[in-house]
Amino acid sequence: MFNSYPYVYVGGVKDSGKTKLLTLCSRIAFNAISSGNISPAVLYRLVQGIRCSLLIDETEQLSNRYRAGIFRNLLLNGYKKGQEVYRNRKTAEGDWEPKPFEVYSPKMLASIERLGDVLGSRCIPIMMKKGLNKEITNKEIDISHPIWLQTRDLIYPFLMKNWRDIRKIYSELKNDTELMNRNWELWKPILTLGKFFDQDIDGLYDKMKSLAVEKTKETQRENSLSHEIVLVETLLSMVKEDKYYKLSEIREEMANRLEYGDWVNERSVGKILRRLGFTQKRRVATGYEYFLKVSEVKEWCKRLEISVDSEGSELSEHTEEEDNQNTSG
């Protein structure tokens, strides 16, 4: 029914219930499949064939470099209808030929690690908190309980009966929110459902609009902070003595640390530097230079909880995934 559909990203510290939430959703979601149960070769065929709800837990996503590349290709394109990913397929003659696979389907990711900016822009984030009530946290999900089958048996006929009305709302829904571009594109299906159910739950649509704006601003604030962290990590690797450093070189190193650093320009880097308090600069023949002190860089490392014993943190460990983008089947 929808032209695009957001992923759900479930984050949080260890033992905060992320995997339990995925297990719960696997009982009621449409054609739910855990990525850990299938081989990469079958993964694309299942998504294209049955539009399965794909549940990706951190254990299988991050433990294998090859699988990480496969998931990345799937996730970058799979939030929007009509997007295809090409995989090599062996022919009867023993040759390899590229075959397109449609990768649009609902997806849910759980991880301790923060998502990069690109994947994060396709997600609605849910941050889990570690529970303190043992009576609740020790409860297990009985995956064989008949309530799950009963729930699905109610959902399917509901879908068959109401999809035309929901589709009509979706096609006629006007953007009366602060959301723009991809944020509106991702939230539109959720707001459509909110408007449909608003007939029975008064005020639901307005509540969902408020939630959409709140979550979007939350993500924007997080992305802004992550850029500051990456820049400080960059300075930590570059600044070995108190002196002037070329803005162009800082920009280049920072771009290399980001998932897609093409957007990074000297102007944006200069703004972040000044926001962090690095305001002493000069103009030379090759452009601007900023005076940076080792002590000030290390002070920002402490503020942002970046280890000064290593030249990078979890936010910079994206290159391995990028290397896998071109992995063929």
Image: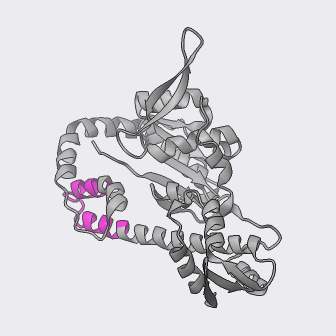
Q: Residue furthest front?
A: 285
- Horizontal relation, residue 308 to residue 33: left or right: right
Nearest to the observer: residue 131 or residue 88: 88
- Horizontal relation, residue 259 to residue 153: left or right: right
Q: In which quarter of the image is the C terminus?
A: top right
- Horizontal relation, residue 133 to residue 102: left or right: right
The answer to whether residue 129 is magenta is no
Nearest to the observer: residue 202 or residue 301: 301
**Where 299 sits versus 145, above or below?**
below
Residue 195 at what x, y percent from top left? Answer: 23, 58
Q: Can residue 216 be seen in this view?
A: yes
Q: Residue at x 18, y 41 (%)?
A: 164
Q: Quadrant of the N terminus?
A: top left
Residue 150 at what x, y percent from top left? Answer: 39, 37
Residue 24 at what x, y percent from top left? Answer: 51, 46
Q: Which residue is drawn at 51% across and 54% down?
A: 119
Nearest to the observer: residue 327 or residue 290: 290
Nearest to the observer: residue 156 or residue 87: 87
Residue 232 at what x, y percent from top left? Answer: 67, 75
Q: In which quarter of the image is residue 203?
A: bottom left
The stretch in magenta equals: 190-212
Magenta portion: prevailing SS class: helix
